[in-house]
Amino acid sequence: MNIILLGPPGAGKGTQSAGLVERHGMKQLSTGDMLRAAVKAETPVGLEAKAVMDRGELVSDEIVSSLIDENLAAMPADQGAIFDGYPRTAAQAGDLDRILAKNGRSLDHVIELDVDEDALVERICGRFSCANCGALYHDTANPPSKEGVCDTCGSTEFKRRPDDNEETVRKRMGVYRDETAPILPGYEARGIVTRVDGMAGIDEVADAIDAILT
């Protein structure tokens, strides 16, 4: 089973991908993770990507698609893949079809985590963590039992990601819409797109995705 998992930043793609890996033995192919691993391992594609990034330029579709190809080729034929953060453009979508065919695979499902933008802004902007142990909290959904004190380690120091602010979050959502809009119609024409309520609880979303895959 080979699937694309779509959704704006904060929609829960990482959480759901991790669950699919655990429940179904699939492999998450995240472009960001693969880039970092290739650069660290100094593979030919990694060295090429590093040179581009060192110049302050964006990594090309060709390099990203080469990473996908490299990782798919190294996987067992019976292991499913979750594409996270790829494809982002119509060109990459075409590349993915060719790469899958080259590796004797096909795309089974495109699953989009459908979210309410205002609610997602609140979800993301309310996140914070313990500066000492990393325990995760949220202003309204999951505050510490005692205000200002970490439930796990008792620390009184907390931190927020600097990009977890409304302006940045809405900008990232706009980029997602601009990048994703061109690739969805082609997949919808093939009848492989399903939307899941990404605002539901983690377990509910996982159950909905499992129902699509069975």
Image (tube, rainbow, N blue to C red):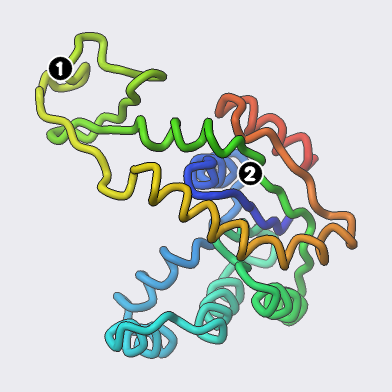
- Residue 28 versus residue 149 in the image, above or below: below
**Mark carried by residue 149:** 1
Count of numbered marks: 2
Looking at the image, the residue that sits furthest to the top is 146
Residue 198: image x %, image y %? 62, 35
Left or right of 15: which side holds 115?
right
Up/down of 58 relative to 214, above or below? below
**In percent of the image, x 73 and y 66: which residue is there?**
183
Which amino acid, mark 1? Val
Q: Which numbered disc flags the more N-terminal residue, 2 or 1?
A: 2
Report crowding for label 1: few under 14, some 14 to 19, many 20 or more residues within 10 A (C-alpha).
Answer: some
Q: Nearer the viewer, residue 174 or 186?
A: 174
The residue drawn where x is 70% and y is 74% is 90
Mark 2 highlights which residue? 24
Q: Quadrant of residue 24?
A: top right
- The x, y position of residue 133, in whole percent, is 17, 33
Which of the two marks, 2 or 1, is nearer to us in this view? 1
**Left or right for 136, reference 214:** left
Front residue of 66/188: it is: 188
The residue carrying pointer 2 sits among few (fewer than 14), some (14 to 19) or many (20 or more) residues within 10 Å by Cα, namely few
Quadrant including the C terminus = top right
Separation of residues labelled 2 and 1 (CA atoms): 37 Å
